[in-house]
Image (cartoon, rainbow, N blue to C red):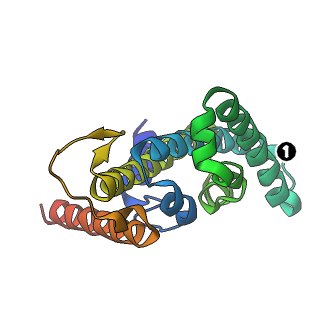
Amino acid sequence: MKEFFKYLINGIFKENPVLVLMIGLCSVLAVSTTVENAIGMGLAFSFVMIFSNLFVSSLRPIIPNNIRIPIFIVVIATFTTIVDLIISAYFPELYKALGIFIPLIVVNCIIIGRAEGFAYKHNVVESLADGVGISIGYIWAIVALGLIREFLGSGTVLDKVIIQSFNPAKVFSMPPGAFWGIALLMGILKWVQQKISRR
């Protein structure tokens, strides 16, 4: 149980895929213009991440080493297709907003990297902990970025006006705003980690 929580916390803070490892940033920067888009992408990513980790870890005794990467991609593609079809059927507006970035989960280097670097080397319980931890880390990073960008870029949160007289800076709805927002979040996380390590 101690190992489970260690791997879980690791993915949220110490090895946060977005703010620490800085991998898989393409979708994070592109779809985080609103909180709604960020939540949708975070949940889609999490579904694929957790189930891919579980399946790779479960199948590792029978996966031939020399063809493991193509097998990982088939597993990831299967869960990406499932989430793609669910979102297109039940959330058409979100599907339209996220566009190509849902099918591109197949080649997201976070998921492929965790399959290769973790799930293929650890048991199912540890892989579940890693998948959940990485997913939570991804979700809080992309939602926080979406919150910053939506509020500063349009003065709303989840399409609701927060401050009536607020004059939004449209640049936060554009690509430069994504980079400024992620830099701010990285700085905050680093500052918190330093505060904790000094105690």
Position above or below: 3 against 148: above
Asked if residue 187 lies left or right of residue 99, the reply is: left
**Closer to the camera, 150 or 38?**
150
Q: Quadrant of residue 65?
A: bottom right
**Closer to the camera, 155 or 19?**
155
Dividing the image into 4 quarters, which one contains the N terminus? top left
Callout 1 crowding tier (Cα within 10 Å): few <14, some 14–19, many ≥20: few
Residue tagged by mark 1? 62
Residue 160 locus on image (x, y percent): 30, 37
In the image, farthest residue toward the left:
199
Asked if residue 92 lies left or right of residue 14, the reply is: right
Residue 39 locus on image (x, y percent): 46, 41
**Closer to the camera, 20 or 25?**
25
Asked if residue 88 lies left or right of residue 34, the reply is: right
Residue 116 locus on image (x, y percent): 68, 59
Q: Is residue 35 visible in the rendered structure shown here? A: yes
Q: How many marks?
A: 1
Residue 190 locus on image (x, y percent): 27, 67
Asked if residue 149 lies left or right of residue 45, the reply is: left
In the image, farthest residue toward the top:
90
Position above or below: 149 against 78: below
Q: Name the residue type under label 1.
A: Ile
Q: Circle 1 sits in a helix, a strand or a loop, which is it? A: helix
Q: Is residue 49 visible in the rendered structure shown here? A: no
For the point 40% across and 61% down, the residue is: 173
Q: Quadrant of residue 161?
A: top left
For the point 44% across and 60% down, the residue is: 15
Position above or below: 151 against 185: above
Dividing the image into 4 quarters, which one contains the C terminus? bottom left
For the point 33% across and 58% down, the residue is: 153
